[in-house]
Amino acid sequence: MNENLLTVSTSPHILGRMSVRSMYLEYIIALAPALLVGLYYFGFPALITVLLAVASAAVSDFIASKIQKKPTTLSSLHIVCMGLMLGMILPPGAPWWLPVIGGALTVFLGISIFGGIGAYPMNPVLVAWVALYISWPESMNAFFEPQALGNGDDWAEAETLLMQLKGDISTLEMVEMSKLWLGQVPGYIGSTSTWALLVGGVYLIIRRIIPWQIPVGALLGAIVMGLIATYTDPRILELGYEEFAANMNVVWFHLGAGGLMIAAFFLGPEPVSSPVTPWGTFLFGVGIGLMTIIVRTWGGLVDGAFYGVLLMNAANPLLDRIRPRVIGKVVSGA
Amino acid sequence: MKLANLLKGIRLPRPPAAAPPVDLPAPEKVYLPLRQHRGAVAQAKVEPGEQVALGQVVGASEEFESATVQATVSGVVEAIVETVDPAGQKVPAVVIKNDGADAWAEDTALGESLTDPAGVKGTRPSRLLKRLREAGLVRAQVEGRPLHVDLSPPMAPQSYLYMTGIPVVRPVDTLIISAVDADPPVCPNQSCLGQSIEELSVGVAALARISGAKRVILALPSGSDTAAIAAMAGPYEWEIASVSQTAYPFATDNFLVQSLTGREVPTPYGEPKDVGVVLQPMISAMDVGKVLMSGRPVIDRIFSVAGEVKNPQTFRVRLGTPISEVLAAAGGGPSRPGKIIVGGPMMGLAIFDPATPVTRETEGVFVQSAAKVVAYADHPCIHCGRCVAACPVNLIPSELGKLCEFRMYEQAADMDLMNCIECGCCAYVCPAKRPMVHFLRHGKTEVLAGRME
C-alpha cells in the first residue's frame, strides 16, 4: 500500500471538538455544584445513595450490552450521567436497595428496551423515578433535615416544604427564602440548591449543550402559572395578600422548591428525549412549568415537575412538527 | 440578521492576516484542461508540436456556456492528454512545455484598453461582455460558470419561479463585490485586499455597467484595513459593508445577498440573479479590470495555500500549474499527506491526484496531514438537536439524516431536503460524528435520480 495516497471524502473536512463523551462529561460537570451542595448538607448517606445509583446503572448497562451482544457504551459516560441524575433525585434517607433497583430500571426499562442512546422516547431517569415512587412511596419520602458537613451522624427525619404546603398553606409565610434558594431545606439530594442548579444550567446553555428555550420556557410557564394560582386559589386568597410583591413571593417559593429547577435545566433538556425544533423546545419547557404549578396547587401529588417532563416527552413527536420556515424555500402561491 | 447569525451556523477561528500574493515562477510544463468551468468542453485549437505564444487561444467552443482557454506559457504543445479537473472528472488537457520566453501572441488584443471607470461608462455593455467572453473569465469556484454567463440576463424565464410571487424575470439592480472568503483559512480575496486598486475600480465599473446595476456594494471582511478601497469607492458612490469572516456560512453568496439587500434567494434552484442581484468575488472583478486595461487575457490566478504546509501563503500562479508544484513552493506538505482539499475545509472537494492543475475554477487548497484527517462514526443519531440549532437555513438535519440513512428519500424531500445548502454546519457540530453532509448529498442525488425516471 502506498502511504502517500490521499484520502477523498465528502466535506466538511474539519469537525467540531464535541463528542458524545465530552457532551455528557460537561453535563456531569454542570451537575457537580448541585451535587456538592447536596452532599454538604446530607453527608454520608447521600454519597452512598448517589454512588450506588451510578454503579447500578453502569453494571446494568454492562449486562444489557452483553445480553444484546453489543459492545459496551460505558466510555461514552451517557449511562454514568443518567445514574448520577437518578441519584440526585432520590431522597438522602433511601434504603440501599432503592438506588440499586432505580439504576437497573433506568437502564433496562428506560434505555435498553428502546434500543439504546438516541432511541428512547422518555427520560429514562424519570421513568425509573416514577416506577420507584409508585412502588415504594414511603422509601421515596425518607427526607432528612439538612445539617452542614461534620455535624455528626444523627439525621432527623423531615418533610419537604412542598409536603408541608399540601397540608398547611401558611408554610409559605414561615419559609426563609434565602435558605430555600441555597438548598438548606429537606429534599432530594441534588435538587435542593436553586443557585447551584442555575449555575450549572447556565453553563450548559452557554456551551450550547441544552437549548435555552427549555429552561426559559419552563421558568416562564411556572411564573405565569404561579401568578394565576396565587390570584385564584382560595387557600392562598385566605392569606390575604394584596401587594403584587407578596404574590410574587409565592412564585419565588415555587421556583426554588421541589424539582422544578433540576427538571427545567437538566431532566427536561436531556438531549435524547427532548424536542429539537425552536418552538417545540420552548413549548416543551412551558408545559413543564405549567404542569409543575398545576399539580402543586390543585393536584393530588406533591410535586409536578417530574411528571410534567414525562408528559411533555410524550408530546415530543407533536412538538417536533412545529418547524421553522426554511430560508429560501419557494412557497407556491405566495 | 446579525443576531440570527450569532445564534445560527458555527464560529470558525479567525484566519491569520493574509499577506499579499507572491508571484510563482512559470512551471516547466502546464496542463490546461479544456473545461475550466461548468458547461461544455472546448475543442482544442492547436496540434501537438505547434509553437504557441502567451495568450494564444488553445481551446474554444461555439457553445454559449463555455469559456475560451488560452496558453499561459509560451512554448511547444507536447500532447493533448486526459487529466482530472478539481471536481475529479476526466477532461482533455493541452500540455505545453515552457520555453521561458514569455512572448505574448500578437493578436491577443481584446480591443483598445480602458484605463479608468469613465472609459468603461462610455463603452456599450455588449462590447464589454464580448471582451470578457473572449478572455474566457470564469467565476472562481469549483463548477463555477463562465463570467459572461453569470452576467447575461437569463436565456429563458426560470420555471421554478412561477407561482412564487417572485418576478420571473427581474432586472438586475444591485451588484455585490465580495472580498470576504466564505471558507477560511483559504483567503485569496483577503490577501488581495488593497492591491491593484485601479484594476479593481475598472473591473467593478465594468461589472456594474454590464449587469445594469445601479447600486454597488463592496462587502469587506470586518476588521480589515479598508482605507484604500474606501478611497476608491468614494467618487463613484459605491457602498461599503463590513461582513464577519468567522460567522460561517454567512459569507456565502445567498446569505450575503440576504444580509446586504434583505432579499431572499429562492432555493434549491435559484440564484442571486433571480432577486436582481449579481454577486462576484473581488478577485473576479480584478481579473475583469485586468482584461479591460491590458487588452490581454488573464493567464494567472490568485491561489491560496492553507493548512499544514510550511509557509501557508497566497500565490499568483500560472493557470495549468500542477497543485503539487504550488505546494512545493509553499515549503512542502506534511510528511504523510492526508487530504488535499480544493476550496476551504468546510465546503471544499478532496482531490485524489496532487498533479491536478490549477484552473480558473480553483481559488486555493487546504492541506491536511494523515493524522488530522477526521473520522466519521457509525453512531446512531442521539437526537440532541445541536444540528437544528446550527442549521443556517432552518432545516431539521437530524431527521433528514436518519431518513436518508434508511433510504426514505422521498419523505426526506417532503421535509425540504432539497433546500439544504451543504454548508456542513450539522456535521461540524454533531457530537456523534455522523457524516451528515454525506447522508444529505446522497439523499439529494437519489431524489433527483428518482425524479428523472
Image (tube, grey):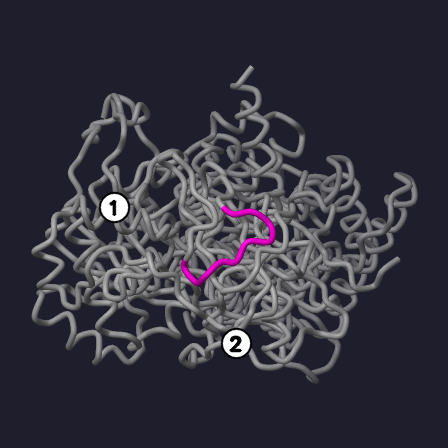
Which one is nearer the viewer's eye here, A277 or B127? B127
* Residue at 53% across, 51% down: B424
- Three-letter amino acid code of the residue under disc 1: Lys
Q: Earlier along the polypeptide chain: callout 1 or callout 2?
A: 2
Magenta range is B46-55
Position of residue A323 in the picture relative to residue B384 (left or right):
left
**Magenta-drawn stretch, dominant element (helix, strand or loop):** loop
Q: Quadrant of residue B89?
A: top right
To which chain does the residue with label 2 belong? B
Q: Is residue B414 left or right of residue A271?
A: left
In front: B370, or A158?
B370
Label 2 sits on residue: B25
Q: Measured from the top left, where is residue A307 in percent x and y?
A: 55, 41
Secondary structure at badge 1 equals: helix
Q: Can you identify the residue that label 1 sits on?
A: B130
Establish if B410 lies above or below B354: above
The correct choice, above or below, for A18 with respect to B333 in the image is above
How many angstroms separate mark 1 from mark 2 (CA)? Answer: 31 Å
Residue at the limit of the structure toward the bottom, as seen here: A150
Front-lying residue, B84 or B107: B107
Query: Is A272 placed above or below A152 here?
Result: above
Q: Is residue B142 left or right of residue B112?
A: right
Dot label at residue A330? none
Whole-percent x, y for residue A120 in the image: 67, 39
Mark 2 residue type: Pro
Task: State the residue at coordinates (43%, 81%).
Answer: B19
Q: Are marks 1 and 2 on the same chain?
A: yes
Mark 2 Cα within 10 Å, few/some/many (few <14, many 20+)?
few
